[in-house]
Amino acid sequence: MDLELLELGMLAVGYHVETGVRSFAEVAEALMVDLETPLAEFEHYLPTWYMGVQAARLAAGHDTSEMDIRHAEEAFRAPAELHHLRQF
């Protein structure tokens, strides 16, 4: 993955997490709106962005209990996990 893309994606996910959007599905929906882009265009990057933000928050001492990392891990293994969001 391009490092600039990684940084920008984590920045976008981090913004939403900081504003209270914690669940993986809600972050995906928010990014679709922000980017005005279908999920299919970035779904393979999203788990990495989300898990990166979770790791960074954890390293900084923030509570990450509301971040559903399990869903991100499942989506990382099987992007089909995100297909229910394609309707947005």
Image (cartoon, rainbow, N blue to C red):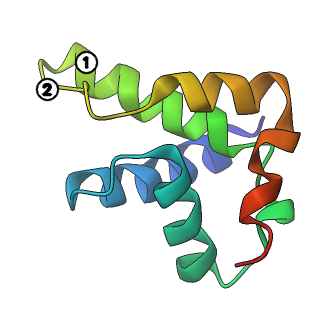
Instruction: Find residue 18 and name its label.
Output: none
For the point 34% across and 60% down, which residue is it? 16
Quadrant that contains the N terminus: top right
Position of residue 19 relative to residue 37, above or below, is: above
Amino acid, disc 1? Leu
Q: How far apart are marks 1 and 2 (CA)?
A: 5 Å
Q: Which residue in the structure is indicated by mark 2?
A: 62
Q: Is mark 1 on a helix, strand or loop?
A: helix
Residue 15 x, y percent position in the rendering: 32, 59
Q: Hey, what amino acid is under mark 2?
A: His
Question: Mark 1 = which residue?
Answer: 58
Q: Residue furthest front?
A: 84
Q: Residue at x 64, y 35 (%)?
A: 47
Quarter the C terminus occupies: bottom right
Circle 1 Cα neighbour tier, 10 Å, few/some/many (<14 / 14–19 / ≥20): few
Q: Where is residue 48 in the image (x, y as percent from the top left)?
A: 63, 32
Quarter of the rendering containing residue 61: top left
Q: Do the residues labelled 1 and 2 touch (CB within 8 Å)?
A: yes
> Mark 2 falls on what kind of element?
loop
Left or right relative to 31: residue 75? right
Q: Is residue 77 above or below residue 86?
A: above
